[in-house]
Image: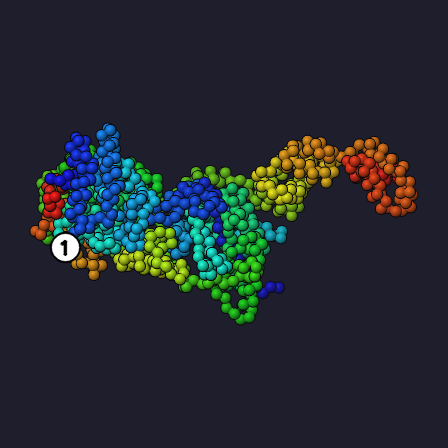
Amino acid sequence: MSTWEPVIGIEVHVELRTISKMFCGCPVSFGGEPNTAICPTCLGLPGALPVTNGTAIEWLARIGLALHCRIAPSSVFHRKNYFYADLPKNYQISQFDLPVCTDGWLEVTVDGEEIRVGIERAHMEEDTGKSLHQGLGGRIHSATSTLLDFNRSGVPLVEIVSRPDLRSAAQARAYAQDLRAVVAELGVSDARMEEGSIRFDANVSVRPTGQEEFGTKVEIKNMNSFRSLERAIASEIERQIAVLETGGVLTQETRHWDEEAGATQGMRSKEGSSDYRYFTDPDLTPMVMAPATIDRLKADLPELPADRRGRYSHLGLESHLVNVLSSSESGLRRVFDDAVALGADPVMAANWITGEVTAALRRTETATDDMLFTGPDLTGLLKMVSEGAVSSSAAKEVLTGVMAGEGTPAAVAQARDLIQVSDEGQINAAVDEVLGANPDAIVRFRGGEEKVIGFLVGQVMKATGGKADPKLVNSLLRQALS
Amino acid sequence: MSLADLTIVEAGVRLRSGEASSVDLLNAVIERASFTEAQLHCYLTIDHEGARRAAETADREMAAGTDRGLLHGIPLALKDNFCTRGLATTCSSQILAGYVPPYDATVVSRLRSGGVVIVGKTNLDEFAMGSSTENSAFGPTRNPWDPERVPGGSSGGSAAAVAVGSALGGFGSDTGGSIRQPASLCGVVGFKPTYGLVSRYGLVAFASSLDQIGPLARTVEDALTLFEAVAGHDPLDATSFPGEVPEMRAGFEAGPRGIRVGVVKQLSGDGYEQPVAAAMSQMLDRLTNDGAEIVEVSLPTFDLALSCYYLIAPAEASANLARFDGVRYGLRVEGETVEEMMARTRAEGFGPEVIRRILLGTYSLSAGYYDAFYGQANRLRTKLIQELDDIHRRVDVLISPTSPTVAFELGARTQDPLAMYLSDVCTIPADLAGTPAISVPVGLDERGLPIGLQVMAPPLGEPIMFRMARAVEERAGFGARPSMAGTPS
């Protein structure tokens, strides 16, 4: 029914969390005092030279392998020349026609439909410093002064360029999320959008449905969350269609996503098109990647999200749960995997992990890595629930206790006195006692007033100090009343 | 004779025998500078205090029996494009006027740990771009043999200082001939090593694939000694040669017998001043007499090497010099916007030759021109390297004049960049090919101006190159010093 087809490609920048920067020995650190992780090289002082960080190159190859790319046996660095205050050498060491990784793909599931998104290339470059524009809006052309922080300058940066294979904002978001998950899984980056350690730009165009040729491409920047990425693309698609349908013409440009306005805004256009005058960086020698190294890196790849999703589906989890669990942090997934390995019911375990456990972490502002709740704990807790040893509400309290470091679920349940009374004799005694004290209730129930049962259950619970299994109480009451 | 006129080897002997101290040597060169500097302007900075401290330390150490090697206590001059911690490093540019680096170049730290006394920083063509040291924002250096003439360049300050005795030796950098050509014009030895044998870390880059640090000295042996002190792998320079520096002393005095000497057809004959050509053929005769074999060889791409160089070097320079933008260090000329500040800073901070080369390089890298210019130049460079490789299968070394002319008068070529560029026609091939080449003084023309010959060798061919350079030096018997050096104190 739509007469316009959007065409979207995504460019991703990923900061690697190597120990040292791309071309010098300065530490890669986030959020330190400005200009404390700097040296002559990453500050672009006269005479300073770059030396390639081999680990960063291997990590890039890991990313490439995870994305089914070809890894170049030899590739070179180029200088990308442009003047910008936070680019200390006024050229960026990057890659041009000989990137490390080419021709890969990532499979993404959107609304139950699986699409394969082509990866054109993934290459290595260095990050820039940060400009902190002071005053008026925080944008460069309205700033009264600018402070520069070079701690980020020279941090290894991987750029991953997709092919224009995406056809909707939702697909683009799914691709971005999945790609982020892959990078996070590899452990090569913090991959935090809000901290800018992973950044997404989108190239968006529209064309009449059925047309082969691409429309005019617009690059959009400044999306700080997956939600804003999706909104920005959707809004840009709408804008482009509106322009075209009113007989307008689109210009190839870079636009800035304005979260508050909910629209993309044209950036002050640079005069002329940019000519980066790429040429091979004569300070660096070609990067050679031996076949043995590539084999080793391939063998070292962890389970990737797409494979994991397949595995979770086979455990009988429905697709929503598969997706939520797959995109959970690795610490949470480890708890899940361990619990399932110990015999826990996968569906129950997944529900707990994606529900209560995630919520508890958020509530207590605990990082997954600091979590004191293990696979055996989850297994134990689920066993207690299924055996009726604790009520489901008490189970949540047990979880809280375990996470607070109070011990195993059994220990916590004991200590916090949460063990449920499931002994029929004990409960029947309470039932008899309650019924004896409430003859009118018996009459009303037998007269068809069903809701009286709730009152009676409450009374039995009260009589057992709240420790009886309510389900059992209910059924024993009904037995006694029948 | 003043201590300032000793070779490094001789000075070393006196230091160890106790006949002279490092402070004595320093005093001698400072005294020499005190009456030559006003006229010659070899130095941009003389580090009186630092040099004195270093000399006193050297004397103390040597008295206590600590010997840091052949350069311990020797006063040397460094070109002002070597970063020296705490000592101004300007590259003869207004854009770096007053800039004090926070770190030492690898070469500088190696010299310091070898106990060298750094007298000061010498004048150069701005950012090493030039062949006369006239392109210095702080005024030209003059030739000690005739102060109306240029010392050559770009390492003209170091060459003139070594020639006149305001240092016992020095270092320069060579991108297209910037060590060898001034050495030739000043009557001293100048050596450009195989690319990668000396670290470039801390050398303010002009053209990274060509730049190489090397010594200037009064004798071939001094040059060898200076080179040994700084050569060797540096993990801070990715283009640094990872292997061992070849052993060069073993055959040093073995003479020319049995050496196959190539004479490049395109590097001889026409285009050379008569005394230069005569000095060359005389030397070839002597070498032949003493058992060397002279072979004429052809380097077809030679005629294109200069054009090739003037595409590659400016292209690299256009990126290397982009960092001088007024943002972090050096000159800043304020503007309404950051872009305007950068543009004004660069327009005012760079001299005309630097601006010319940045424009040239920017142009040759531009979209649509890259392939015709920079790309083509690189292909030509590859071809030149292949041709030289082929030649070196047939000959051990190549000999040519270092410069087509002797020292020219100040101002003679400043209005004609092409004429100036031609000064480097003999030296450029070794830079493009990354091969070692040395200039040795062989005589004076009838006006008393020095003539130099160049010995070139294949990559890592330093041992045979030094052996031949020593043979040339011995046969030339060049012992002349500029009369200024002899001015009694």
Q: Is residue A420 left or right of residue B354?
A: right
Mark 1 closeness class: few <14, some 14–19, many ≥20 residues within 10 Å: some
**Residue in front for this viewpoint, B406 or B43:** B43
Residue under circle 1? B148
Q: Residue at x 38, y 61 (%)?
A: B335
Q: Furthest-front residue in view?
A: B49
Q: Furthest-bottom residue in view?
A: A247
Q: Is residue A461 left or right of residue B470?
A: right
Q: List x then y, in percent, for residue A290.
A: 41, 40
Query: Looking at numbered disc 1 in the image, what kind of residue is underneath it?
Result: Glu
The chain identifier of the residue carrying mark 1 reads B
Q: Secondary structure at mark 1?
A: loop
Q: List x then y, in percent, for residue A265.
A: 52, 62
Q: Residue at x 53, y 61 (%)?
A: A264
Asked if B413 appears above or below A430 in the picture, the reply is: below
Q: Residue at x 15, y 39 (%)?
A: B3
Asked if B438 appears above or below A409 in the picture, the reply is: below
Q: List x then y, in percent, for residue B110.
A: 28, 38
**Residue in front for this viewpoint, B403 or A457:** A457
Q: List x then y, in percent, for residue B424.
A: 21, 52
